[in-house]
Amino acid sequence: MFVIDTIVHRLKRGCETMAYPKGPAPALPDRHGGALKVNGSLCAEGCTACVPLCPTAAIARPAGSSVALDLGRCIFCAACVEACPQHAITQTGDHRMAVSRREDLLLGQPGLEEARLAAALDRKLLKMFGRSLRLREVSAGGCAACEADTNVLGTIGWDLSRFGIQFVASPRHADGLLITGPVSRNMELALRKTYEAVPEPKIVIAVGACAIAGGPYVGHPEIHNGAASVVPVDLFIPGCPPHPLTILDGLLRMLDRLGKKG
Amino acid sequence: MSASTPFALIANSTGLPWGEVPAWPVREFVRATARELDRGGRLCAWFGVAENGGTSLVAVLAFDADNTLAAGRSAPFTGSYPALTITHPQAHLFEREVFEQHDLMPEGHPWLKPVRRMDGNAPAVGEFFKVDGREIHEVAVGPVHAGIIEPGHFRFQCAGEEVLHLEIALGYQHRGVEAALAGGPHLATMSQMETVSGDSTIAHATAYATLMEALAWTEAPLRAQWLRAIALELERLANHTGDIGALANDVAFLPTSAACGKIRGDFLNLTALICGNRFGRGLVRPGGCRHDLDTKRTEQLQDRLKVALADVGQAVAWFWDAASVRSRFETVGTVFPAQAAEIGLVGLAARACGLVRDVRYDHPAGWHRFAQAPVSVWPSGDVFARAKVRALEIERSGQYLCEQLATPPGDVLYAEPDGPSPDTLAVALVEGWRGEVCHVALTDGVGRFRRYKIVDPSFHNWTGLALALRGTAISDFPICNKSFNLSYCGFDL
């Protein structure tokens, strides 16, 4: 009988929700690599080995300058990491990558080797959203991977609702939007209308390389190169797709829920 | 018998010179295609190729029982041609697509309108089919939906609770995938293939990689083919488990819903164990694979797989044990076998109507030539059948993985293929978790893509969802929709 089975199962398993953020963060898969660190000062004179390998043109080496990598465009294929003879581009294994300003994802210059992680919302917004944040999700050309790894935060292992964060079925009930996908032109109107339907004050979160900068589709005439081309964005979470832990870190960081450890 | 077909025979994951694809004047070509479909052929792809100021129509057919594919084409033409849809409804979306892309008018097409054309800042959805009457009401849903899912628009014509007709308008996700492939492959092509439909990364990446290998008249090393087959089944396990959980959630059966949500993640993490990415991005490349499974990693994979399979087995058993679940699924959202064959359903939706259709079995390529999984079929065509086929396939895929992981072949994982041959047509079919992923490439005189056609299983199957809703209560739409769980971006491209 499933009634007894399920109860016994529950008793045996106990609570399956992870200890994070009170306990340590779960480990990323060892081949994931985490965030990138770019130390432009290590670049050899005239070397552009990484530049032509990047599928999203996230890397440039302007004449007379060291390498510049846009973590917002990056899909984390690690082709550049493998190709760099100087180890100027390295994987840190760090799941934390969310930033509040787009330019905080531009890596390479001295002092700017890594992403400058997002600050918490200001006091007024924190008072409103810090313990209760309702989001409406808009997929606008998303491939269903960012959507899936956002969705997974609602499962028992992650249990997003313990932080007071919930996805709602109407923009009228929402405090903000979480946007995935490069924003296809065919979704522009729907995205604008959804944004306008969210009451002020509102926040917008762009999840994934597509929503930040167009991802693998950057430059296609059928898309806008990311959510910020259509609505103002308050939090950028890189990845293709970002690991659920990276998304959760971004949300908690913005809501100042990570304490000193963050 | 396909042996006597006037079309050029072609095996899955191989190519043939474009000049050897037989061509007819368009009227004859449509008649010839209709004859082949009448003899048991199935339309895998139907698309246009710009040629000499006109357009040639190309048909790729599958003769499942004969384990062969066939290709034919029309001479270049402009203007109109007699629609194939009139006699063979499985062509209806293909002909709309050709109409939209090449401005060719299929004469007599019963519902000719755009598929994904852009109209400023929204798709050109056109007029919806309307049912008249004082008792009739219309329900519009989307494009933005209530959950964390992709956008699309559903227009229902209802009499009370009962749905008389559902029209599905898509195109919102259009990213210009096919248009960008002209002149390719480009630097971004592989990443685009991995995101054609993000939950089918391995299926689409494998189809593309196999096609590139076929165009170079070669194939990937065996070990890479083995690893692709393993990743493909992990993808199937993750998605089927997630869908069973979602179906349970929609009928408020929380034990299975909660358990499957977690176990789905366990399967995704197994893919991440292989390549670092939960969806398998970065694993498959033309010429082989980028990450290997060493002995230690294989053991880890086997151990974790065993646990996840036992967990999902238990969660699914609760589900079937509950009469309240079974009664919500049985006889709801039925697609009849004859309908399924007529509209050309593929994959698990077709197998849930009793049709034995599975590329791994009918058109084995790659590792599936050496190791096949049995085809899981259920006859009733309803939500129950689609859940049941998923449950059966979870068992079969689990068993397949356990067997294959125990016998890894060779040790070479990658061999760089030559560039694609010029003026060659190649076809690759892969049985993704939803069904048949079909990629067709035609190269130009220097081996660049002249035309690249992608047919996601969703392209065939959205019509199945529309039919499933006829006579069904609109309140059952969520479980019908979940039972198909089709891709929007795979359709919109």
Image (cartoon, coloured by chain):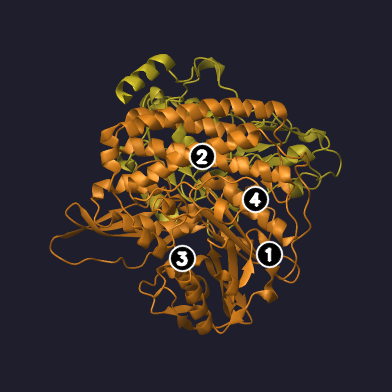
Image quarter hosting the N terminus of chain B: bottom right
Q: Position of residue A174 (x, y in %)?
A: 34, 37
Q: Position of residue A101 (x, y in %)?
A: 56, 36
- Distance between mark 4 and mark 1 Cα atoms: 17 Å
> Are discs 4 and 2 less than 8 Å apart at CB?
no
**Colour in which chain A is drawn:** yellow
Q: How packed is label 4: few (under 14 Cα within 10 Å), some, or many (20 or more)?
A: few
Which of discs 2 and 1 lies nearer the camera? The answer is: 2
- For residue B407, what is the image quadrant? top right
Q: Using the image, determine if residue B435 lies above or below residue A28.
A: below
Q: Nearer the viewer, residue B376 or B229?
A: B376
Q: Nearer the viewer, residue B399 or A148?
A: B399
Total number of numbered discs in the rendering:
4
Q: Which residue is mark 3?
A: B117
Residue B369 has which mark?
4
- Distance between mark 4 and mark 3 Cα atoms: 39 Å
> Are discs 2 and 3 less than 8 Å apart at CB?
no
Q: Position of residue B341 (x, y in %)?
A: 41, 62
Tell me, yes or no, whether dots 2 and 3 are on the same chain.
yes
In screen coordinates, is B159 left or right of B183? left
Q: Is residue A182 visible?
A: yes
Which amino acid, mark 3? Arg
Chain for mark 3? Answer: B
Which amino acid, mark 2? Arg
- Distance between mark 4 and mark 2 Cα atoms: 17 Å
> Are discs 4 and 1 less than 8 Å apart at CB?
no
Q: Which residue is mark 2?
A: B396
Please, what secondary structure does the residue beneath circle 2 have? helix
Chain for mark 1? Answer: B
Please, what secondary structure does the residue beneath circle 3 have? loop
Q: Which residue is mark 1?
A: B15
**Colour in which chain B is drawn:** orange
